[in-house]
Amino acid sequence: MRAHIKPHRFTGTVRVPASKSHTIRRLLLAALTEGSSEIAYPLDSLDARSCVSVCRALGVEIAEHQDGGGRLVRWTVRGVGPRRPDAPAAALDVGNSGTTLFLALAAAALGSSPVSFTGDAQIARRSAGPLLAALSGLGVRVASGPDGCIPITVRGPWKGGRVSLPCPTSQYLSALLIAAPLAPAGVLTEIEVPLLNERPYIELTLSYLKAQNIPWEGAADFSFFRIPGGAAYRPLSGPVPADFSSAAYPGCAAVISGGPATLLGLDPEDPQGDKAVFEILRQMGAEVSWSGEGGDRALTLSRSGSLRGGVFDLNDTPDLLPVLAATAAYARGDTALVNVAHARIKETDRIAVMARELGKLGVACEERPDGLVIHGTGTPPAGGLVDGCGDHRVVMALAAAALGAAGPVEIDAAESAAVTYPGFLELLTVKEG
C-alpha cells in the first residue's frame, strides 16, 4: 500500500494505544500459569495477534471480548502451565514479532517436546544466536538455520547452569528471566551479561517478576543474575499500560507540524524507556507539558519556534531512532543520535534506511557505525516518494516527517504501520493508494 500525505498541522486529542511490550509479556505470562487471567485493553495489533496465535498453538485458551463498537476490550486467557507435554503439530509462526519469537523460544524450552518456530521475511534475518547458545548451555537442545535464524527448534528439559549471554537486544535476557523461574525445583540458572543494550526493557521485565514475588538475585548493573527454579506465575488481571513507543509518533507529528496535540493514557511512572522521547523533544525546543493527576494525566506537545540539534544517546531506546531522525530534519544544526548500533538489527537496518529515505527528501544525513547524524538547516524537507521498507517504525516516522514538508510525500509499503499502531495513518488523515 502506498500512503499519500499532504503537509498539514497535526492537532487534537489522541488516546495512546496499549504497550506492545506489556501486552506480549502479559500474554506469555498468562499462558504460563495454570489459571485464568484477564488482560484488559490490550494492544490489538499484528504483533500482538502473532503472539495470540503462538499461544493458542501451544494449547492456551484465549477468549476475546469486544465492546458494542467491535473494539477489543479484554482477553480471558486460560494458561497451560510452564511445561506443556505435547508439541504443536506445526511450526509456530511469529509473523513479524521479534518479541514473540525470543520470549516464546525460552518458554518453549521448558517442555520436553520439540517446538519449532518460523516467521516472515524480516524475522528470517533476525538472529537468535546468542539466546540459542545460552539455552544450549542450560541443557536445552536447539537447532536453527544459518546464523541462529529461523527455522528454529528447541527441546527441553531445562537443566540449569551458568551461561554468558551478550545482549545486543534486551529481548534475549528478558526471555531467560521470564522462563528460568519455571525450571524444576532445585535447578539454578546463572546468567552473566557482558553486554546489555535497552536496559529499561529489563527493568520492565523485572517489574513483572517483582509483582509476582518471583525469587531472583542480580547485580545492580544487570551484569549477572541468579534465578532458582521451582516458582510459578499467578494469573494476571488489569488494564495494559499505554505505550510510550507509540506515543512518540503523534507527539513528534505535533512538534514537526506545530501542534498542539494532547496525548491521553500515559503513566510517567511506568518503566518504559521510550518515555525519554519527550525530554529529548523538550531539549530540542518543543513545548512539552503534563497536566492532571493519577490515571487522568494528559501530555500536550507543540512548537512555536525553531527546533535545535543536539547529541542524544539512544542505547536504552533504539526504537526512537527513526522518529527522532525525522524530527531532527526540522532542526537547525546537527543532531547526532549515538550509541545505538543495535538499531541496525531491528526489522531493518534503521540507521541506513532512515539516512537513505530522508535523503530522498533532501535531508543531509551521515551514517556512523553506531548512529546517525542529521544535518538540519531549519528549512522543511522536500516532498517526494520514499520507501517504508515494510518496517512499521520507519513508515510512521516518515509519515510524521511528511506533515511539515514542502510538498506531498508518498510512502511505499506503508501497510506495515499496523504491526504496532493500527490506525496511525488514518489518525494523520492519510490518503491510501
Image (cartoon, rainbow, N blue to C red):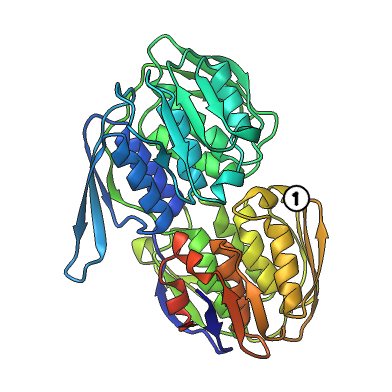
Could you tell whether 187 is left or right of 84 in the image?
right
**Of the pair 147 and 345, the residue shown nearer to us:** 147
Image coords of residue 200 (percent x, y) = 57, 45
**Of the pair 46 and 326, the residue shown nearer to us:** 46
Image coords of residue 116 (percent x, y) = 44, 32
Q: Can the viewer see residue 105 in this picture?
A: yes
Q: Residue at x 50, y 18 (%)?
A: 140
Image coords of residue 50 (percent x, y) = 39, 49
Q: Quadrant of residue 14?
A: bottom left
Q: Quadrant of residue 333?
A: bottom right
Q: Residue at x 58, y 35 (%)?
A: 128
Could you tell whether 340 is left or right of 365 in the image?
left
Q: Quadrant of residue 149?
A: top right
Q: Residue at x 43, y 78 (%)?
A: 426
Question: What residue type is disc 1 on?
Answer: Asn
* Residue at disc 1, secondary structure: loop
Up-down: is 299 above or below 122? below
**Of the pair 149 and 395, the residue shown nearer to us:** 149
Q: Can the viewer see residue 206 in this picture?
A: no
Q: How many marks?
A: 1
Could you tell whether 233 is left or right of 7 in the image?
left
Up-down: is 89 above or below 338? above
Up-down: is 317 above or below 157? below
- For this orientation, the residue located farthest to the left is 68
Image coords of residue 321 (percent x, y) = 66, 60
Q: Residues within 10 Å of mark 1 (few under 14, many from 20)?
A: some
- For this orientation, the residue located farthest to the top is 186
**Residue under label 1:** 339
**Of the pair 269 and 247, the residue shown nearer to us:** 247
